[in-house]
Image (cartoon, rainbow, N blue to C red):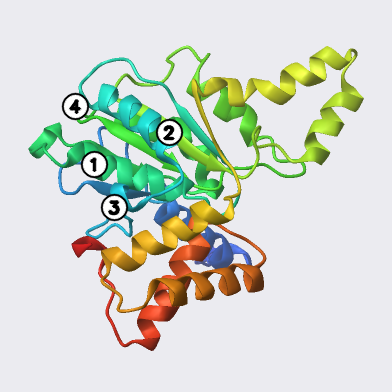
């Protein structure tokens, strides 16, 4: 009897790729590229100032910080005295407070933070110099991760957020409250947090009113309103300048940069300038000096002032 020939084995065809596979692969690659770097201490030894990049988990060194020398900041002497003392305590290893600098625009809040850091470091060398680490407002959610990594470094740091405020449905301020004071770990001993804001409590009026509307008692809304700013032990208010103080700031800048302009002419220019700008502040004064220096073809170097 003839043997039956077994059927030929069918060759298995390669499975068809899913139509979304290329897209999913691109998404996975993008997520890997944007993932934060592994934990551990960050290196803050290469410079005196850094900018935190939340996506990469890295601190980018800043070689030259744009700042005004402390002695040129007029009209805010009391605020400068208090912030300098607090920063000096921190740099020396003693207890110090988080600081909130709030008030009028252009009054010198961020300039004061940078100037104070430079003044404290003036007679210090190496690791004894305090580091300034800037975190952007939009990266405030990454603050716990940054603090965890700064905790592991022996260098003392000022963590700085400029123009910190919260709008609409933004709930990141609640995370900030827990991180600054009140969390299990608390703020690292080698870090103080300095923030500037145009608002005393950093919350938009609409947010405060919403808290009031949803609270059972008005006192609860008030507690929620002030609980964030309460995390800052040092409050420094900045207010609009009177004309005499504004003119003194303009004169101080003009003298520092040796601008060849007569006193009465400078005064007239300053009054006219402030009127056209509708404001008197350190920023407005500095903008006037830049305009005059540019007209006179004189270079202005803050580092040599």
**26 displayed left or right of 150:** right
Residue on which the image places disc 2: 78
Provide the residue designation for mark 1: 119
Q: Of discs 4 and 3, which sits in the foreground?
A: 3
Mark 3 highlights which residue? 69
Q: How far apart are marks 2 and 3 (CA)?
A: 16 Å
- For marks 2 and 4, give the one nearer the viewer: 2
Residue 249, quarter of picture: bottom left
Bin the neighbour count of mark 3 within 10 Å (Cα to Cα): few under 14, some 14-19, many 20 and up: some
Quadrant placement of the C terminus: bottom left
Position of residue 269 measured from the top left corner of the image (x, y, whole percent): 51, 76
Q: Residue at x 58, y 28 (%)?
A: 175
User: Is residue 136 something one can see in this rendering?
Assistant: yes
Which badge, 1 or 3, comes first in the chain's sequence? 3
Query: Mark 2 or 1 closer to N-term?
Result: 2
Residue where numbered disc 4 is placed:
154
Discs 2/3, front: 2
Q: Residue 141 carries which label?
A: none
Q: Earlier in the sequence, mark 4 or mark 3?
A: 3
Which element carries disc 1, helix, strand or loop? helix
Marks 4 and 3 sit apart, C-alpha to C-alpha, by 27 Å
Label 2 crowding class (10 Å Cα cut-off): few <14, some 14-19, many 20+?
Answer: few
Circle 2/circle 1 CB separation < 8 Å: no
As rendered, which of 249 and 114 lies closer to the eye? 249
Residue at position x 57%, y 24% in the image: 177
Q: Position of residue 174 (x, y in %)?
A: 64, 27
- Check whether the beta carbons of the residues at disc 4 and disc 1 lie within 8 A of each other: no
Disc 4 versus disc 1: distance between alpha carbons?
21 Å
Q: In which quarter of the image is residue 98?
A: top left
Cα gap from disc 2 to disc 1, whole angstroms: 16 Å
Mark 4 in CB contact with mark 3 (< 8 angstroms): no
Residue at left 73%, top 16%?
Answer: 223
């Amino acid at each position: 009897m003839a043997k039956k020939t077994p059927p030929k084995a069918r060759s298995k065809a390669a499975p068809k790729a899913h139509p979304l596979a290329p897209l999913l692969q691109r998404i996975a690659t993008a997520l890997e590229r944007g993932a934060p770097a592994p934990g551990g201490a960050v290196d803050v030894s290469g410079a005196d100032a850094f900018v935190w990049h939340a996506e990469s988990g890295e601190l980018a060194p800043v070689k030259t910080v744009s700042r005004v020398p402390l002695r040129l900041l007029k009209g805010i002497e009391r605020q400068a005295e208090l912030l300098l003392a607090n920063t000096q305590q921190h740099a020396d290893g003693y207890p110090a407070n988080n600081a909130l600098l709030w008030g009028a625009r252009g009054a010198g809040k961020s300039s004061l933070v940078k100037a104070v850091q430079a003044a404290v470091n003036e007679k210090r060398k190496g690791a004894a110099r305090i580091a300034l680490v800037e975190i952007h407002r939009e990266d405030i959610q990454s603050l716990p991760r940054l603090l965890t990594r700064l905790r592991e470094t022996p260098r003392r740091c000022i963590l700085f957020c400029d123009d910190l405020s919260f709008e609409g449905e933004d709930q990141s301020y609640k995370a900030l409250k827990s991180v600054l004071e009140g969390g299990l770990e608390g703020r690292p001993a080698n870090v103080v947090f300095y923030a500037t804001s145009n608002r005393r409590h950093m919350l938009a009026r609409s947010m405060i009113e919403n808290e009031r509307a949803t609270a059972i008692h008005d006192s609860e809304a008030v507690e929620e309103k002030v609980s964030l700013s309460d995390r800052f032990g040092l409050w420094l208010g900045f207010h609009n300048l009177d004309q005499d103080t504004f003119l003194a700031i303009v004169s101080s800048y003009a003298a520092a940069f040796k601008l060849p302009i007569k006193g009465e002419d400078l005064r007239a220019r300053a009054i006219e300038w402030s009127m056209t700008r509708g404001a008197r502040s350190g920023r407005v004064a500095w903008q006037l000096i830049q305009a005059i220096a540019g007209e006179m073809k004189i270079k202005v170097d803050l580092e040599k002032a």
